[in-house]
Amino acid sequence: MLAFTTDNGYLDGIVRGYRGALITAAQYTNMTHCESLDDLKLQLASTDYGDILQGDTQPSVAAVRERLMERFVADFNYLLDNAGIDGPTARFLEYVTVGYMIDNVVKVLLGTVKQRGGSGGGAKGNPAGSPPAAFGGDEQIMEQCHPLGMFDALPALTVSMQGGSTLEEVYRTALVDTPLGNYFRDLLMDASNGHQHQQRLEEQHVELIRGRLWRAYLEDFARWCRERLDAATAAIMAEALGAEADRRTIAITLNGVGVLQREQRLALYPRLGGLWELG
């Protein structure tokens, strides 16, 4: 605690500034009464976000979302760039990006599977609880990926999937040296998968992969928080990660009705929160 200011004082000040810049309840109420995006632009002018639409003479919903996302990513990357190479703060921020990486990888896999017409999932092809998405060409797929989950090897996935790659080929081609590599390796080594990793990837299989990756990620993140963070921060993170685990458990259960056996659902439930033991 005595060394906190020395090690983290600057970033703590930046985060407090970010928090102070959040839109207040009163400002949000005023925005709900706006009748046009021009009115919204005027309301934003009185907040710390007043400059995000200055370059847009004709603001649109897409422009508002894009500018806010750019601001969010820039603020996050500023923290990451100033967190140092080693240390718990940098590692914590890197853990935060892993969830976005998982969803980006799944977007690319699903997009290329849909392009080749191999949905294989039918109406209940989302047992892992993900929302449906529209996909176009490779460029459109990449545009849908979240900026915080981008990594150098991600575009290579679209190339490796063109010939109908298996999970093992996807891992060796593009993911072995990424933060997701350990999770994919454990997935490949899991005996309960049988020979699924040698099969041609289909939509429902990809959704099951999403569920397994999120389970591994949440459990790993929670373990790291217990081991590396102080007790108070670890308790807060346990509650936050437990809530996310419960949300995913509910989604898997609802979307898995008539699709997954109980053993399959249990394999997707993160061992966190208060719901997974109910099975």
Image: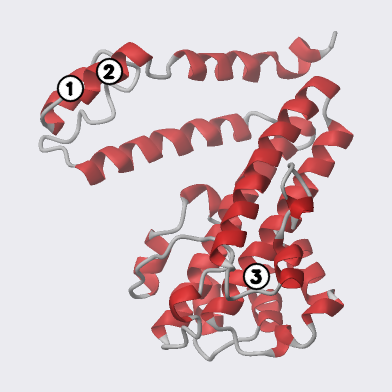
Vertical arrangement, residue 7 with respect to residue 126, above or below: above
Q: Does residue 177 show up?
A: no
Vertical arrangement, residue 96 with respect to residue 236, above or below: below
- Give percent across and percent down for residue 166: 64, 85
Cα separation, mark 3 vs mark 1, equals 43 Å
Q: Is residue 238 left or right of residue 34?
A: right
**Circles 1, 2 touching at the beta carbon (< 8 Å):** yes
Q: Amino acid at mark 1?
A: His
Q: Is residue 85 left or right of residue 64?
A: right
Q: Amino acid at mark 3?
A: Ile
Label 3: few (<14), some (14–19) or many (≥20) C-alpha neighbours in 10 Å? many
Q: Which residue is mark 1?
A: 33
Q: Nearer the viewer, residue 194 or 109?
A: 194
Q: Which residue is mark 2?
A: 29
Label 1: few (<14), some (14–19) or many (≥20) C-alpha neighbours in 10 Å? few
Residue at the (72%, 18%) spot, across then down: 8
- Which quadrant of the rendered structure holds the C terminus? bottom right
Element at label 3: helix
Q: Which residue is mark 3?
A: 209
- Give percent across and percent down for residue 220: 79, 49
Q: Amino acid at mark 2?
A: Thr
